[in-house]
Amino acid sequence: MKYLFLILILTLILSCGNERPQPNFYKNLFTGEILNKTEFEKYQASFTLDYIDSVAKPKIVWKFYKLDKSSDSIIQNFKYDMRLEDKYIVRAEDYKKIGMKILKQNFKSINGKEVIIGGKQNKPTFINLWFIQCPGCIAEMPALNRLKEKYADKVNFVSLTYEKKEDVQKFLKKRRFEFTHITNVETFIKEIASYPYPENIFIDKNGKITNIEGPLPSHLDVDVDVAIEYYERLINKLL
């Protein structure tokens, strides 16, 4: 018991020591400019002010990267995605695989169903890339399920993961994820993926990647309905 208590205290000390420090400066990775906290808050607010008289309001997703630390400064590196309606004005990353044509490939789902990805098809395809220990992947599943329920007859909803079939089957006993699941496909994922999971890929009826998006907000996020509406617009363009 004594040793167990000591281990518990040591764990608490280490966990406290690993808390993420608060930055006092912010570095814009697009421009290299460094802002203090007040300047960064004004910079964030400026996007709304610039479009205050506009009918279309910008949708901005901030991307925070690694911290740079020195003796007296903690600098938070950042970029952002900025979208007006369905058009991106700025993206944090280059999605070079948009426009890529996927050749027809055959797979089997965990239920033994034949699945074709790429090539000419009667329906567009929505692909979700995920893995079991990915918090963002799990958080977006309720929203993805809503899309599947609405467009199940019009779109092929497929999830791809490098995980083993048995592990995914075990996971699905605890969590609802209504896509057609294909496992053990790390090589194919590398062909079509752009950045870390989760990633959502829209493919038209000719096998061309038309859009690549990061994670949807969780089902508890106040913006989830707005995000789903955007995904629905992308889907409707492919129908």
Image (spheres, rainbow, N blue to C red):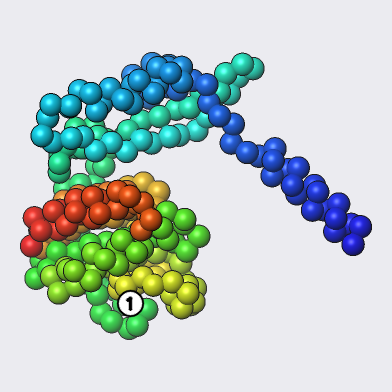
Quadrant occupied by the C terminus: bottom left
Identified at 36% across, 63% down, the residue is 141
Instruction: Identify the image quadrant of residue 28.
Output: top left
* 103 over 113 or under it: above or below: above
In the shown orientation, is residue 184 left or right of residue 46? right
Q: Position of residue 23 (x, y in %)?
A: 53, 26
Of residues 104 and 66, the one drawn nearer to the viewer in this rendering:
66
How would you rate the neighbour count of disc 1 (Cα within 10 Å): few for under 14, some for 14-19, many for 20 or more?
A: some
* 23 over 83 or under it: above or below: above
Quadrant occupied by the N terminus: bottom right
**Secondary structure type for disc 1:** loop
Of residues 72 and 210, the one drawn nearer to the viewer in this rendering:
72
Amino acid type, callout 1 = Ser
Identified at 25% across, 79% down, the residue is 114
Q: Is residue 100 visible?
A: no
Identified at 24% across, 28% down, the residue is 48
Q: Position of residue 134 (x, y in %)?
A: 47, 57
Instruction: Identify the image quadrant of residue 19.
Output: top right
Q: Position of residue 164 (x, y in %)?
A: 47, 71
Q: How many marks?
A: 1
Identified at 36% across, 58% down, the residue is 219
Of residues 185 and 234, the one drawn nearer to the viewer in this rendering:
234
Q: Is residue 124 visible?
A: yes
In the shown orientation, is residue 55 left or right of residue 77? left
**Outermost right residue:** 2
* 184 over 36 or under it: above or below: below
In the shown orientation, is residue 217 left or right of residue 51? right
* 51 over 203 or under it: above or below: above
* Residue designated by label 1: 109
